[in-house]
Amino acid sequence: MTGRLVIVGAGQAGFAVAAKLRSLKDMRPITILGAEDCLPYQRPPLSKKYLLGEMTFDRLLFRPESWFAENAVEIRLSTPVEEIARDEKVVRLFDGSAIPYETLVLATGATPRRLPAAIGGDLDGIYTVRDRKDADLMAGEMKEGRRLLIIGGGYIGLEAAAVARKLGVEVTLIEMADRILQRVAAKETADAMRAIHRKNGVDIREKTGLVRLIGEAGRVKGAELSDGSVLDVDFVIVGIGVTPNDRLAVDAGLDTAGGIVVDAFARTSDPSIYAAGDCTVFTWRGAQVRLESVQNAVDQAEAAAAVIAGGSEPYDPKPWFWSDQYDVKLQIAGFNMGYDETVLRPGSREESLSVWYYKERQLIAVDAINDAKAYVTGKKLLELGRNADKAVVADPAFDLKTLLS
């Protein structure tokens, strides 16, 4: 038994730290401080099955309330932290109280970027996609025949478009860059996803920005776009990226660089303080990265917990992601940062393909659209550190499984 561990943040990473410590039979006192008013829950289904009404909120919970008592984990909800006093080793709450810690974990996540008020960003009817409240508010807007403008052609925007179309909402999606998914995926993947969305009735406008939102009685009613058009709009979803929640770290004097800087053991510049999840930035393959994914949140948090419990294994990410849109499953293995070549492999059925990313002739990532075999094979190759000959990958007649033999 050692001193108290305080975890700031009750999301995927915060919960994973506590659960991993208990699975390792580490029974030190744990207090989780969550800003939301509900127990830790899965976020990805919020913008999919939960918003569609196919999954109730209780099914999103990682564990029922009883788990926390049974595992001696104190959880305080609706409890945002005001500051960290490192010299006293306490976190201060907004009600003036303080909680001492021996070890502190920051799992504060990230916050969606919002539109500036100068272009109408403060009007009612504008939403981001991050937590339960966001999903609940949007659910009331998703009615057949209503008109939705989505700003941003990344995964958040595309997933929102898919859900809206399933519910009969008319959708226009604008992307300021040359194409959708420009920051995160190759042209081949973007081309395939664009075709799928247009087939499902989404009006996708690339190289198109927002000039301003038009309001009436304080609520959004229209949008003026950079292509000169003016749309009638009933509501807006903004998916233009997130900002890491590093204010507490900055104010406490910890090292930050577009996120809380941690080493390979999830330690910050203060040896008593760790961080995990979307709020962190760390060195991987020679570059500073911030991985916004469930995989990173869980794996980095569990690596931190193992070190806190006395282990010495560094965190070595094995990135994977996924995105469900309509009946299409996009699965991604690896991280395509810095790729200089791609290979397109046709799949065995309609709307099925994979895109293989290479950097200096070495395989670094795979996007698989409705192609589980390509995803599984690519993921395994990456985990094993093996390469895949580009000519072989491009041949749809070649059995990918033989690459693993």
Image: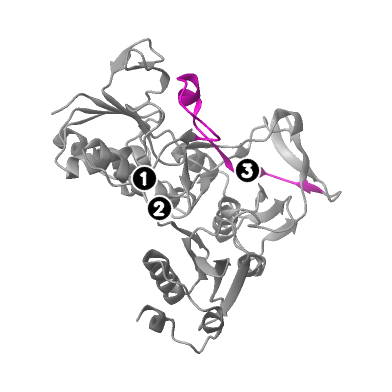
Residue 145: x %, y % from top left = 65, 54
Sequence-wise, the earlier of marks 3 and 1 is 3
Q: Mark 3 belongs to which amino acid?
A: Val
Give the x, y percent position of residue 190. 64, 64
Position of residue 176 measured from the top left corner of the image (x, y, whole percent): 74, 50
Query: Is 249 inside the magenta-drawn segment?
Result: yes
Amino acid type shown at disc 2:
Pro
Q: Is residue 309 above or below residue 394?
A: above
Which element is circle 1 on? helix
Tag 1 residue: 300
Residues tagged 1 and 2 counted as in contact (Cβ below 8 A): yes
Q: Quadrant of the N terminus?
A: top left
Q: Is residue 379 above or below residue 234?
A: below
The part of the image, by quadrant, that contains residue 351 is: bottom right
Instruction: Please rate how many residues cluster around mark 1, counting C-alpha atoms within 10 Å: few if below 14, some from 14 to 19, many from 20.
Output: many
Q: Which mark is residue 282?
A: none
Badge number at residue 238: 3
Q: Mark 3 or mark 2, which has the lower sequence index?
A: 3
Residue found 56% across the figure and 70% down from its top: 361
In the foreground, 377 or 352: 377
Q: CA distance from mark 3 to mark 2?
A: 29 Å
Give the residues drawn in magenta, as a range: 230-259
The quarter of the rendered structure image containing the C terminus is bottom left
Instruction: Judge whether residue 184 can be spotted in this image.
Output: yes
Between the C-alphas of marks 3 and 1, the distance is 28 Å
Secondary-structure class at tag 3: strand
Look at mark 2 in the image and give the residue it sits on.
317
- Determine crowd level at label 2: few under 14, some 14-19, many 20+ residues with C-alpha closer than 10 A: some
